[in-house]
Image (cartoon, grey):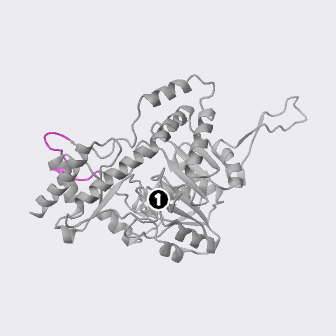
Amino acid sequence: MALSTQGAGRAGRAEPPPGGIRVRHQPVGSDFGLEEIQAIAQTLQQDAQTDGPQNRAFEAEFASLCGVPYAFTMANCSVALIVAGQLCGLRGGDEVITTPLTFVSTSTSVLSCGATPVFVDVDPRTFTLDPDAVAAAITPRTRAIYAVHLFGQCADMDAITAVARRHGLRVIEDAAHVAGATYKGRPAGSLGDAAAFSFHSRKNITTLGEGGMLTTRDAAWAAKVPLLRSIGVNHGVEHPAADYWLPLPYDVEAPDGYIPTNYRMSEAQAAVGRVQLRRLVANNARRRAIARRYTEALADVPGLVLPHEARAGEHIYYLYGILVDEAEAGFGRDALMRTLFCDYGVQTITGYPPAYWFSVYQSRGYPRGLCPVAERTYDRILMLPVYARLTDAEVDYVIESVVGAARRLRG
């Protein structure tokens, strides 16, 4: 995870209070228990340890969650995004519009397909793509829009999709943060032409540290995904050759000219994912409950801008991000993070740096200042702990610590 802890004590390093860290930010997004252990043990008795019955069952169950006919397990979300780009037919010279305020793999997946990411600014309340900025960035080279659902809340998909349809563009959902979230009653993963999900260890559904899923409604795309995910192998295709008495047992294809590789998920990961999926609704409800308590308790703290939950969807709070308005608060984001960590033992993290700040984009000539709203957001945002196993007592302690730290910093 590319989000970073902040705070500086002696020698520039943050130091927790004498009692140590009292509330960690988010060591894991969803716990493993006896059910996951039993699922792994049962899977080890199978003949197939990859691309077998657990993967097929997990795909069917996840497709049902998203309300789509097709879902495909992947090694992680990053490669799911690469496959999505290949389905879009991305080539050198093509452009893809996306947000800089996300993990960098959203845009590097575009680079992996040979295309060019075009970063546009975000809505200052939801931090997701600004549809007007998307519309203004379209050129004759634009082929797709990668809409990121951020921190647990879906982007303004109706507006984004309307722009895309006017220009004949594909829309890919980066749904890494929103398994189980909805937008206007429709599940994340069903809102674009395809969607990529993450099952990294910090997410609200996890598959042994890494994992992902690609969903789509497009039957033609669905026919290509198994080849792109599994080295282009097409089982059951026989090609008789005059010089050999046995037919080839399978063929290896290059769909649309892309050279496929191995993006498969193991059977043990899929088995764990199936168990995790059964707990997803309850875990998301717990995150929302914690978020409500934070919002109610911190609403009157001067200078803290709490998350905006758009009426169009249900925010599942993969992350709970607050902005610090230094002019009103009398202190900045870094000072609050440092005080929470050093004096109270509450670990917080920053948001995502704008992707074009990284060397991979600086070396390509992307300037700083490109998306000022995204840059200001990164400079001001911090994430409070929010995950299902937080106890009520820990939530109360985080609230008391934020209120106490703000009061102390204001003097």
Within 10 Å of disc 1 (Cα), the crowding (few <14, some 14-19, many 20+) is: many
Looking at the image, which residue sits at the far right?
Answer: 242
Residue at the top extreme of this rendering: 45
Direction from residue 223 to residue 169 in the image, left or right:
left
Q: Quadrant of residue 58?
A: top right
Residue positioned most to the bottom? 136
Residue 207 position in % (x across, y down): 48, 38
Q: Main secondary structure of the magenta part?
A: loop
Q: Is residue 39 or residue 123 the one in the foreground?
A: 39
Rendered-image quadrant of the C terminus: bottom left
- Total labels drawn: 1
Decide: is 316 above or below 159: above
**Residue reaching furthest left?**
411
- Where residue 146 appears, x then y in whole percent? 53, 62
Residue flagged by tag 1: what amino acid is it? His
Q: Is residue 68 left or right of residue 339?
A: right
| Depth order, front residue of 13/98 | 98
Q: Quadrant of residue 72?
A: top right
Span colored in magenta: 5-20
Q: Residue at x 49, y 67 (%)?
A: 156
Where residue 235 appears, x then y in whole percent? 75, 37
Q: Quadrant of residue 26?
A: top left
Magenta region includes residue 220:
no
Q: Residue at x 47, y 60 (%)?
A: 154
Residue 368 versus residue 148: which sits nearer the camera? 148
Q: Which residue is mark 1?
A: 149
At a point 43% along the width and 55% down the height, the residue shown is 103
Residue 322 image point, x, y percent: 29, 60
Badge 1 marks a residue whose secondary structure is loop
Can residue 13 be seen by looking at this rendering?
Answer: no
